[in-house]
Amino acid sequence: MSRPFRLDTKMLGKGRRFITTEVRSMSSDNVTPETHKTKPERAFSVDTVRRRSEAKQSKQNRIMEAALTLFSRYGLGGTSIDQVAELADVSKSNLLYHFNSKEQLYIEVIKRVLDVWITPLAGFSEDQEPMEAISNYIRIKLEMSRDFPEESRLFCMEVVQGAPLLSDELKTPLHDLVETKVSVINAWIKAGKMKRIDPYHLLFSIWATTQHYADFAVQIEAITGKNLNNKAFFDETLNTLYQLILNGIKTQHIDD
Amino acid sequence: MSRPFRLDTKMLGKGRRFITTEVRSMSSDNVTPETHKTKPERAFSVDTVRRRSEAKQSKQNRIMEAALTLFSRYGLGGTSIDQVAELADVSKSNLLYHFNSKEQLYIEVIKRVLDVWITPLAGFSEDQEPMEAISNYIRIKLEMSRDFPEESRLFCMEVVQGAPLLSDELKTPLHDLVETKVSVINAWIKAGKMKRIDPYHLLFSIWATTQHYADFAVQIEAITGKNLNNKAFFDETLNTLYQLILNGIKTQHIDD
DNA sequence: TCCAGTTTAGACCATTTGGTCAAAATACAT
DNA sequence: ATGTATTTTGACCAAATGGTCTAAACTGGA
């Protein structure tokens, strides 16, 4: 409950590019409904404005955290505003004051998740050693499954349901990002630094396998009795993924 | 809309053990609410009873199909009985006549899906060649993602949400099935027929990668513009998965 | 034709739910 | 203290929804 929403860079290998949501959300202004556009002429001190804004932010964060928890567990349709309000410990009206509607809240939450979610991929660049870059990426993704399972599940549910909201985000920003990274991988291949493989499917496989441990955690626990919070289990998972994926692309003996 | 719910064995490589839902559901009797327990003493001919039962079945199948479509797209909470009724082209009351409640309907649907879903795994047996058995399994799973995406998504959503209904099914039948197959894989390893690998994670990786193409189809389409119904795309997906997974376990040169 | 069992439809209901509104409380500069 | 901008609250509402109940329609056997 008290876990901060924003990603903490320290838990990610070289995840230097993570955006703190504090900063981002400050500048996004469709969060608050209709704060009168006419700014009070010098009504409040700069300091006061900042303090208030921070308080507002923190309250909105609390609401979004609660929303994340419930949306990721029960879906949009399975979660009521009242439930979110109760978990966030605010009145329903107050929640509606901060977010225009349930859909609006949902959108805010999922936009945050998406931002955070696709960020690690940005790390790939051509001058890196592919094996290191990719194994690093796998590790980071698996850490995210361990540390942000709710985010993973919400993203999963949204996409599974057809991503009505996200489809634009997927079609352009994500599509383009992937496109550039595919080029990087192809360059690596051309340079003989790794085996020939379809870069798209390579990425999909990495996403699938790592996210699976968050999204299907119940199933995995039902079968193995363990989850990623178990250090030994985490390590053996990571090693197996290394074995499968890295083996499939490591250039050991030249292939046709 | 007219696609039959039940799995058709012909589309699966050696999927001989698939249960046709016709047969199964006939024997499950908590589907129908309260058909008076006192059987009419010879009231209807055997033939009539059978005909009626079939008609009932087919109507229930129609409802369950509609339910599958909507539940897999909007989730349990996001789907109303009215919507299901409309899609199945029956009145709401009639739907409630065949299924006690929305939850009941949901349970029936998801139980079917689960049955069908875990069946291919049953094929594994120690006397097979591991490479063939596993590549076969991968292919079948990928075919299922192509041919039964709704089933895949519903299963996915249910598990992601914590599988409140399925957790028993997962903890015992699935757990036990996996346990026996893990033994098979371990036997293969001990016999030197494949590389040493954690069988659990191997299975998880196969599930994750294959199901990903159904569950995250929108994302994949947004990025590549293609899906598994595209023959070329299907083949290249399958080949990449072969490359990754089989390479990771194929015993080519002896390892440690 | 009549009857019993079965299926279907429509009217109806209680509850939940998303959302509005006006008023109250709070914070702050003068 | 007073006035203004902002935040919070509780009362209220209309629509949607899950579900019940009764009556009608249909089916097949006598």
Image: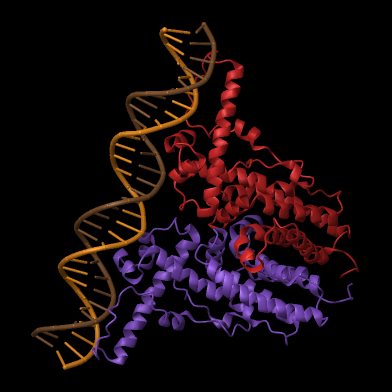
Chain colours: A red, B purple, C brown, D orange
**Residue, x 71% and y 79% (percent of image)?**
B183
**Residue, x 46% and y 66% (percent of image)?**
B68
Q: Is the residue A155 above or below the residue A252 in the image?
A: above
Outermost residue toward the right? A253
The count of marks equals 0
Q: Quadrant of the N terminus of chain B?
A: bottom left
Indicate left or right for A224 with B130 as reference: left
Q: Is the residue B45 above or below the residue A68 in the image?
A: below
**Residue B32 image offset from top left, x and y in percent:** 35, 75
Indicate left or right for A92 with B132 as reference: left
- Asked where in the image residue D2 lies, by quadrant, the reply is top left
- Is residue A159 visible to the viewer in this orientation of the structure? yes
A61 or A180: nearer the viewer: A61
- Is residue B90 visible to the viewer in this orientation of the structure? no
**Residue B172 image offset from top left, x and y in percent:** 57, 73
**Residue A93 image offset from top left, x and y in percent:** 42, 35
Q: Quadrant of the C terminus of chain B?
A: bottom right
Indicate left or right for D15 with B186 as reference: left
**Residue, x 60% and y 82% (percent of image)?**
B15
- Asked where in the image residue A231 lies, by quadrant, the reply is bottom right
C9 or A150: nearer the viewer: A150
**Residue B132 image offset from top left, x and y in percent:** 73, 81
**Residue, x 66% and y 48% (percent of image)?**
A117
